[in-house]
């Protein structure tokens, strides 16, 4: 397993990772891919690599990308302010539960910290088990709606470096 920056030639893969990032309480219930046409979701991937704050780390195994953690400064679900990028992360289903998501996020946090970003934010469904992962990585709940938490991780202190 290698964690590395996503290559420009691989940005089209983010559509699949965005689809996988949409939380489903029942993973066996598939969502229509039409959901990816919604402007509120397209903003996470459309033209990725063209905005100055676009960053993405990829998990590569067996010669293919199996996960991604990416961020950009956008006005989306997890927006806090225009200087704080919003995180999205997902793995292909067969690769979940192996600590890869943790490594991806840690790598991205380290990169953003080294580049001087003050923080990163995200929006997550309250019932999503990933909330615990985000809390372990230093995210804290800043706001909540009936269904979601808006979380922030301050980057002034460098996060622990990922292994490998």
Image (cartoon, grey):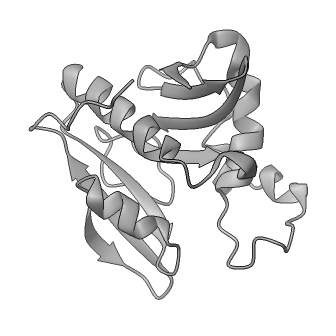
Q: Is residue 43 left or right of residue 136?
A: right
Q: Is residue 137 left or right of residue 133?
A: left
Residue at the far left: name it: 157
Please state which of residues 42 and 163 is positioned toward the viewer in this rendering. Answer: 163
Question: Is residue 72 visible from the viewing direction of this image?
Answer: no
Q: Is residue 159 left or right of residue 7?
A: left
Determine whether 125 is above or below 51 in the image: below
- Which residue does the image show at 74% across and 78% down from the upper left? 26
Displayed quadrant of residue 47: top right
Please state which of residues 29 and 55 is positioned toward the viewer in this rendering. Answer: 29
Q: Residue 64: where, in percent of width, then height? A: 74, 22
- Which residue does the image show at 14% across and 33% down from the upper left? 158
Q: Quadrant of the C terminus?
A: top left
Residue at the far bottom: name it: 146
Q: Quadrant of the N terminus?
A: top right
Determine whether 153 is above or below 4 in the image: below
| Total count of labels | 0
Question: Is residue 94 visible from the viewing direction of this image?
Answer: yes
Determine whether 100 is above or below 5 in the image: below
Q: Residue 36: where, in percent of width, then height? A: 79, 51
Displayed quadrant of residue 58: top right
Q: Residue 109: where, in percent of width, then height? A: 31, 35
């Amino acid at each position: 397993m290698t964690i590395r920056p996503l290559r420009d030639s691989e940005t089209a893969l983010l559509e699949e990772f965005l689809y996988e990032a949409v939380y489903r309480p029942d993973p066996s219930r598939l969502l229509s891919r039409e959901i990816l046409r919604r402007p509120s979701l397209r903003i996470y991937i459309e033209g990725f690599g063209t905005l100055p704050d676009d960053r993405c780390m990829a998990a590569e195994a067996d010669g293919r990308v199996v996960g991604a953690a990416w961020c950009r400064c956008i006005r989306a679900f997890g927006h806090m302010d225009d200087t704080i990028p919003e995180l999205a992360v997902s793995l292909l289903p067969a690769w979940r539960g192996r600590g890869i998501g943790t490594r991806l996020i840690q790598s991205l946090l380290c990169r953003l910290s080294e580049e001087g970003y003050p923080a990163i934010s995200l929006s997550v469904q309250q019932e999503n088990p990933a909330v615990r992962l985000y809390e372990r990585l230093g995210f804290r709940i800043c706001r909540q709606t009936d269904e979601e938490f808006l979380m922030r991780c301050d980057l002034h202190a460098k996060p622990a470096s990922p292994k490998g």
